């Protein structure tokens, strides 16, 4: 049984991105450092053998590869990055009561399931969020987001939110948001299901 006070250790598993995708598009820094060090080692090794020209070519090639990784990470947004960014935007929209932003981020049949309320349909969910959350939340941070893509048109994000209020102590929570997009790969990801996994101080937050 989950403790309502301490963050659970058995959170739902989110499949991480593959190492190649992460290195190429999301977190290239380690790969860039490794390639740079390899190029430097090759340069030093070849220079000791009197092959400075070949060493400079190896160093230059390493620099080009590292630069390519840097560019690819900034020019290409993976679907994992896109749903993570939309999850961040959704938290901001709900926290501030931005109904237009919520409308753009939610699907027509979006459903919210929690022990406090159950709502289905974009208009009902927006009314519920707009009437309850902004008055309770005065500030928030997102310490962590996890995302995976179970299918080409299906995504999930787990978002940790830390909310501040002058009326209540700072509270942490984990939320699961399911996303879908249309057959057209250019279509936007929209939230279709939202539920709390854990809310500090509250037992059985999802109330399934």
Image: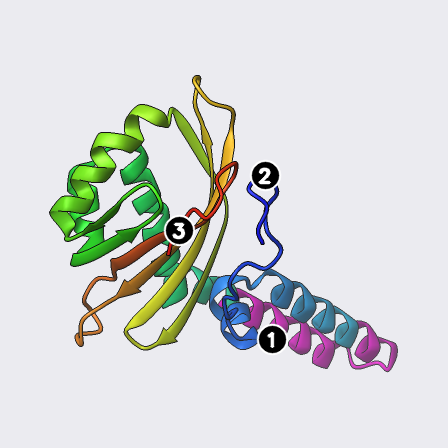
In the image shown, does 60 or 121 lie closer to the viewer?
121
| C-alpha distance separating marks 2 and 3 | 15 Å
Residue 60 visible in image: yes
Q: Residue at x 86, y 82 (%)?
A: 49
Q: Nearer the viewer, mark 2 or mark 1?
A: 2
> Where in the figure is residue 187, as x and y percent of width and height?
18, 66
Dot 3 falls on a residue whose secondary structure is loop
Q: Earlier in the sequence, mark 2 or mark 1?
A: 2
Mark 3 = which residue? Answer: 206
Q: Residue at x 38, y 51 (%)?
A: 207
User: Magenta part mainly helix, strand or loop?
Assistant: helix
Mark 2 = which residue? Answer: 5
Dot 1 falls on a residue whose secondary structure is helix
Assess whether mark 1 and mark 2 are in contact (beta carbons under 8 angstroms): no
Residue 76 visible in image: no
Q: Earlier in the sequence, mark 2 or mark 3?
A: 2
Seen from this angle, which residue lies furthest top?
A: 166
Q: Earlier in the sequence, mark 3 or mark 1?
A: 1
Q: Is residue 47 magenta?
A: yes
Mark 1 = which residue? Answer: 61
Q: Which mark is residue 130?
A: none
């Amino acid at each position: 049984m989950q403790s309502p006070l301490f963050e659970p250790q058995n959170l739902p598993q989110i499949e991480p991105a593959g190492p190649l995708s992460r290195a190429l598009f999301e977190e290239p820094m380690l790969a860039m450092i490794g390639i740079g060090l390899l190029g430097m080692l090759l340069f030093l090794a070849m220079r000791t053998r009197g092959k400075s020209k070949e060493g400079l070519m190896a160093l230059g090639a390493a620099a080009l590869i590292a630069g390519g990784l840097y560019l690819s990470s900034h020019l290409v947004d993976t679907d994992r990055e896109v749903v993570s960014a939309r999850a961040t935007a959704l938290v901001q929209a709900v926290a501030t009561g931005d109904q237009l932003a919520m409308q753009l981020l939610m699907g027509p049949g979006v459903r919210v399931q929690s022990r406090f309320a159950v709502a289905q349909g974009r208009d009902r969910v927006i009314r519920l969020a707009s009437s309850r959350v902004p008055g309770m939340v005065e500030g928030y941070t997102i310490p962590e987001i996890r995302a995976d893509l179970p299918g080409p048109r299906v995504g999930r994000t787990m978002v940790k939110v830390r909310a501040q209020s002058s009326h209540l102590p700072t509270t942490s929570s984990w939320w699961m948001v399911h996303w879908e997009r249309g057959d057209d790969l250019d279509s936007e990801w929209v939230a279709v299901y939202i539920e709390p996994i854990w809310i500090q101080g509250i037992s059985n937050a999802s109330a399934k």
